[in-house]
């Protein structure tokens, strides 16, 4: 029987991201993927949100940027429930996006995992599991017959119909919306002229305005740019489509006719996707040695957020599993994964469910809801708040009585420090907790030194320091912060408590 530290079930974006995190930490990691070869289905067109920042913190964004058709850039406008959020007014917008088709993203994540020594087996279907005191046994139907693997931990990253979730008996309550959305880019045919504002002037039909049009039969949206037009429809429909069966131009054309009641000429397809929406969340992301992440743990009823959420799950879980295998994880650390990421998914469910009401509301009441919402989002504060929700930086982390930064993502800042990458981002390449001393606090640095190499200690100056010192976790969240000029006694005891909570017992001379 093969014996590994971790089995990851599923080689989608979540499983491959997690495998890379575990491989980097030196864990013997096996990925089991049912498909014999990588899926080429046109699903997500890119990455959006906090995961871009996290890949940057890992020092790995360049790999993805080089394969992308765009740099990671601030999102100027982002769809939200049949409207567009316009972030152009912000010098530092809350959302970033990068175009990268999902098959390409998965190939790069697989490459990253392979570089860390992860074994990815394709054509290997997980059909059973059994939990024991110190291990999990996994039953696999492989290319050359059935076999078993023993692992310290198993993570089900096996998608919305997760077998791991089912085998573990974890309920997955929620709502499936009887709605199918179709999103395509096609070339502009001769009978259509793209106007300067993105509207389409269609021969014998007239002008179809840029943006969303709600009718009694659904929602239509279009945009034109150069020789390409984007077309979107949403209709009430209960058909279960196979993601591997691509949408055709004829299917899209029929949908546009039903929604708009007219024939829109369409050119050659460049990108065609079709999807349905559910709002579901697993009751728990952990059952003893088995964990769930990505679509296996949550499904959101609006677009552009799922991969971000799944890959952030992986970043949260990876270092905690590594700490458990390496033997330093404090009791309860693994449970923080389920608590934190369930709370984050609740925030994502909140705004994606709200988007369902916005885009599906019909008649004068629906129109009024959208008009009012559009008005509200011309104000900066609501727009920033929605941006943080969309980006996944609003994680629903309970605000502690301590420093207001605790629970927030550390934002990248220039540091005045003698370091090969003198930015905050450069400190997290190794995916280990870091004490960032911003006020030459030798007392705090010495204290963190008791945790040996498990905790990085960096002293730096920064313009307008937000705190005297920060303890930053490998997933870039701030676990503890010392207020400016906080006295040594209170700062040291709070730091010791935070280090013990997140990094276990010190490795050298424990002092009380
Ligand atoms: C048309 C379409 C468009 C989309 N657009 C976007 C978008 O713009 N932005 C966005 O963020 N998201 C988008 N999504 C959603 C996104 O594709 C998913 O959220 C994402 O793929 C989830 O990643 P995952 O790794 O959690 O699961 P998956 O990608 O579903 O991967 C799960 C893997 O597990 C494997 N597996 C399942 N069972 C087993 C088993 N028993 N043994 C071994 N392997 C198993 C599967 O074969 C699969 O490869 C879109 C989805 C669709 C369908």
Image (cartoon, helix red, strand yellow):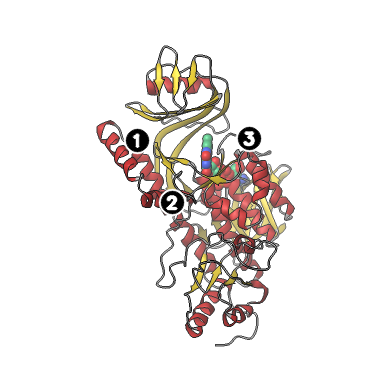
Q: Is mark 3 within 8 Å of ligand 1?
A: no
Q: Residue 56 is drawn in which quadrant?
A: bottom right
Farthest bottom residue in view: 512
Q: Residues within 10 Å of mark 2 (few under 14, many from 20)?
A: many
- Residue 389, numbered label: 2
Residue 288's spot in the image, x, y percent?
54, 63
Q: Which residue is identified by label 1?
A: 360
Q: Residue 445 is drawn in which quadrant?
A: bottom right
Left or right, residue 221 beside residue 39: left
Q: Which residue is identified by label 3?
A: 40
Farthest left residue in view: 364
Of discs 1 and 3, which sits in the foreground? 1
Q: Mark 2 or mark 3: which comes first in sequence?
A: 3
| Placement of the N terminus among the 4 image quadrants | bottom right
Q: Mark 1 or mark 3: which comes first in sequence?
A: 3
- Residue 309, numbered label: none
Report whether residue 162 is seen: no
Question: Residue, x 55% and y 34% (percent of image)?
Answer: 243
- Count every numbered label the image shows and give the total: 3
Question: Residue, x 58% and y 55% (percent of image)?
Answer: 54
Look at the numbered discs 2 and 1 and tell me whether their residues touch, using CB distance below 8 Å: no
C-alpha distance separating marks 2 and 1: 20 Å
C-alpha distance separating marks 2 and 3: 30 Å
């Amino acid at each position: 029987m093969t014996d590994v530290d971790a089995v990851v079930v599923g080689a989608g974006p979540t499983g491959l991201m997690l495998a890379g995190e575990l491989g980097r930490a030196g864990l013997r990691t096996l990925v089991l993927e049912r498909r014999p070869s990588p899926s080429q289905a046109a699903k997500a067109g890119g990455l959006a949100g906090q995961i871009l920042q996290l890949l940057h913190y890992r020092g790995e964004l360049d790999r993805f940027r080089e394969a992308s058709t765009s740099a990671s850039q601030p999102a100027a406008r982002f769809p939200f429930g049949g409207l567009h959020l316009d972030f152009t007014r912000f010098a530092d917008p809350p959302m970033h996006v990068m175009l990268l088709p999902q098959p390409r993203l998965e190939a790069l994540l697989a490459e990253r995992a392979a570089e860390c020594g992860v074994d990815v087996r394709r054509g290997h279907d997980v059909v059973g599991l059994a939990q024991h005191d110190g291990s999990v046994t996994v039953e696999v139907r492989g290319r050359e017959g059935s076999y078993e693997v023993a692992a310290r931990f198993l993570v089900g990253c096996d998608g919305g119909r997760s077998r791991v979730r089912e085998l573990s008996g974890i309920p997955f309550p929620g709502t499936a919306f009887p709605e199918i959305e179709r999103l395509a880019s096609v070339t502009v045919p001769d009978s259509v002229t793209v106007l300067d504002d993105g509207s389409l002037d269609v021969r014998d039909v007239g002008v179809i305005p840029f943006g969303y049009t709600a009718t009694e039969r659904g929602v239509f949206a279009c945009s034109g740019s150069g020789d390409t037009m984007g077309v979107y429809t949403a209709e009430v429909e209960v058909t279960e489509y196979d993601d591997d069966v691509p949408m055709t131009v004829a299917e899209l054309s029929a949908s546009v006719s039903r929604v708009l009641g007219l024939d829109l000429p369409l050119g050659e397809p460049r990108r065609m996707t079709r999807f349905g929406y559910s709002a579901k969340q697993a009751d728990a992301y952990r059952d003893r040695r088995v964990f769930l992440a990505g679509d296996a743990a949550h499904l959101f009823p609006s677009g552009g957020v799922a991969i971000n959420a799944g890959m952030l799950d992986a970043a949260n879980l990876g270092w905690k599993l590594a700490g458990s295998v390496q033997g330093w994880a404090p009791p309860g650390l693994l449970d923080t994964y389920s608590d934190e990421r369930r709370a984050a998914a609740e925030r994502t469910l909140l705004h994606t469910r709200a988007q369902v009401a916005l885009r599906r509301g019909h008649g004068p009441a629906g129109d009024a809801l959208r008009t009012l919402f559009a008005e509200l989002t011309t104000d900066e504060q609501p727009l920033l708040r929605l941006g943080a929700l969309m980006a996944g930086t609003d994680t629903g982390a309970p605000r502690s009585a301590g420093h207001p930064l605790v629970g927030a993502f550390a934002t990248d800042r220039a540091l005045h420090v003698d370091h090969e990458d003198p930015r905050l981002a450069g400190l997290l390449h190794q995916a280990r907790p870091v004490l960032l001393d911003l006020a030459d606090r030798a007392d705090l640095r010495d204290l963190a030194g008791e945790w040996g190499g498990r905790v990085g200690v960096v002293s730096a100056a920064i313009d307008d320091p937000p705190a005297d010192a920060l303890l930053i976790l490998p997933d870039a969240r701030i676990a503890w912060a010392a207020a400016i000029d906080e006295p040594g006694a209170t700062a040291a005891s709070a730091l010791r408590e935070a280090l013990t909570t997140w990094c276990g017992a010190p490795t050298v001379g424990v002092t009380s």
